[in-house]
Amino acid sequence: MRLKSAHNIIISPVGDFTTDLLGPIRDEIKRIYGYPTEVLPLLDDLEFAYHPNRNQYHSTAILDQLALKAPVDAIKVMAITQADLFIPILTHVYGEAQLGGKACIVSTIRLNEGHNALNTQEPFFSRIIKEAIHELGHTFKLRHCREHTCLMHYCRNESDVDRKSDQLCRYCKILLDDEIKRLVK
Amino acid sequence: MNKIKILIVDDELIMRESLAGWLERDGHAVQTAASGEEALEKVKETQFDIFLVDIKMEGISGLDVLRSVKESDPEADVVMITAYGSIPSAIEAMKDGAYDYMLKPFDPNELGVLIEKIIHHQEQARENIYLKEQVKERTRFESMIGQSQPMQGIFNLICDVAPMDSTVLITGETGTGKGLAAKAIHTNSSRRNGPFVTVNCGAIPEHLMETELFGHQKGAFTDAKETKKGRLELAHGGTLLLDEIGEISMRMQIDLLRVLEDRVFYRVGGTQPIEVDFRVIAATNRNLEEAIKAGVFREDLFYRLNVISFEMPPLIQRKEDIPLLAEHFLYRFAQETNKPTDKISREAMDEMMLYDWPGNIRELENAIERAVVVGKEREIFPEDLPIFCHEPTPAKRANSLMEVEKTHIQQVLVANQWNIARSAKILGIDRSTLYSKIKRYDINKVA
């Protein structure tokens, strides 16, 4: 069943997440993308995407479900999970997004140096926020950026994430503005 | 920047889609093909930069796609995608020209690094082609001048050699521009932003060579009041030119060989090993193979240096470059000396073309400098070129190159009242070389 919502961005936590983390993510999404943002769990679990051979979760399958369950009026929907994600061709991913689509997902486990328990300390929080903004950026058609300090820069490891800023570069900002204008039309 | 065009060829839909999605987020223009047949159809319509091809496919196999792609577009790079069981096929693919192979599933970082590496390699190859095309009709390359066939060959060779990090040995007579060639290699290499350090092995006395190369620690010897970095350390990250390598002592050859092998050395009096990373270019006017036979040059050092080698042609083999070089030097020295000289007379040019220039470009350079300084007119005439004032010219009378050289040195020495510094400058050689030639040819000062 589809839920109803205003024109906003949905953060959909899967598993235990406190407002300590979800609150700052919501604020940052609002600051960067300008849309009202709310927290709304849409998936009860990720078992449908679990692959026992890899002991990981197939992120593309999760995105398909997420897009199906997204409220009709939601502009974008972003899931957040502590599960380890993969796409078939790669060993793992930090997250995945439908380029120019509706859904994206970010996993916290590899941003936390592989620990399962949710870490509430810095720089872990900042890393999750940055990668959440990053994955959401793909749904606004933004691609990876060469600028090392830009939020859309692809990071190979945690220290790369720590090095990048909490801002989009000028070039990505323009592309984002163009896409938002297009969506408004 | 243009998007990199990538074609993914895999018969598994899920693999194609996941890889395509990943690469699209990286900003690349990605297309997919579900079979070898479809891939070859797409190749007819689009020129791809990179192919990611699964080895095991029904029908046209990945290896067939590779061979076909490399045949139609040798510049394209093909990466084979393989599972553990297909590694032997992947190795076979490498022999057939595949750039690399990756085992499924890929580590995302390794994939990113590989794609970046291919892009960088293709950019370099394009730059190289561009550089060669620029050079083709050019009479200048870096600080080198020449439109002759031998020099165009040298320019092309430098373009090929520069991007590699291999050691280069440049041979050629004195004054042929070995130093300029070394500098051009450095400037066109990835080390271009690093230092270019020259060690003139023939000019540094043996007892100073060790500290000059390796530096010294404060207190290493009586005069070592401060710690000093040697040339090897100063060349870190850049290129080290070992000029006149044939003149280096046997003892220093051993030390140098050790550094070139280990890339580690100690300052004189130092206890801490210093690691260095530089490219070595060696230059010599001596025949090192003969020096090895004579027992004055180590064979192992020779092979260490002689990875890539080329010879700078003597001026006599590129006479058509003389007018261009002469004009260049005329302009430069007229500017430097603030003189109005701006022309070389036809007669002077004819004389220059007839002369054999045993001192090569350096001798020509010095002759023009002198002509600009002593000339009274705006134009240079034969009488302004002192080397032509002695009749008959030795080259026309003598039987061998050695005799020509001996006679010419004798004449220059007499004309300059045996002033060694001035004579060496006119001859375009170092004073130490002039001394050794005087000794070798047994030239005596006649009262």
Image (tube, grey):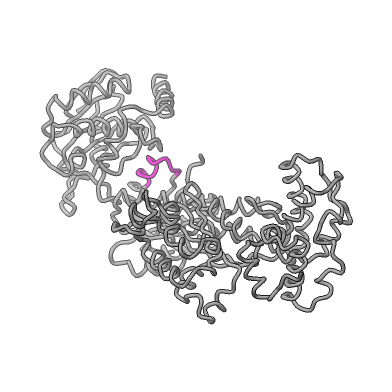
In the rendered view, tell whether residue B215 sits above or below residue B290: above
Residue B97 visible at all: yes
Q: Using the image, determine if residue B343 lies above or below residue B302.
A: above
Residue at the extreme bottom of the image, as rendered: B293
Which residue corresponds to the image point at 26% horizontal and 37% vertical from the top-left?
A63
Question: Residue lying furthest right in this view?
Answer: B347
B28 part of magenta stretch: yes
Q: Where is residue A15 in the image (x, y as percent from the top left)?
A: 12, 34
Left or right of residue B421, residue B225 in this image:
left
Which residues, given as a range, are shown in magenta?
B20-29
Quadrant assignment, res A164:
top left
Q: Where is residue B241 in the image (x, y as percent from the top left)?
A: 52, 58
Of B209 and B363, the residue lying toward us? B209
Residue A163 lies in quadrant:
top left
Above-or-below relation of B411 to B17: below
Image quadrant for the C terminus of chain B? bottom right
Residue B42 visible (yes or no): no
B353 or B248: nearer the viewer: B248
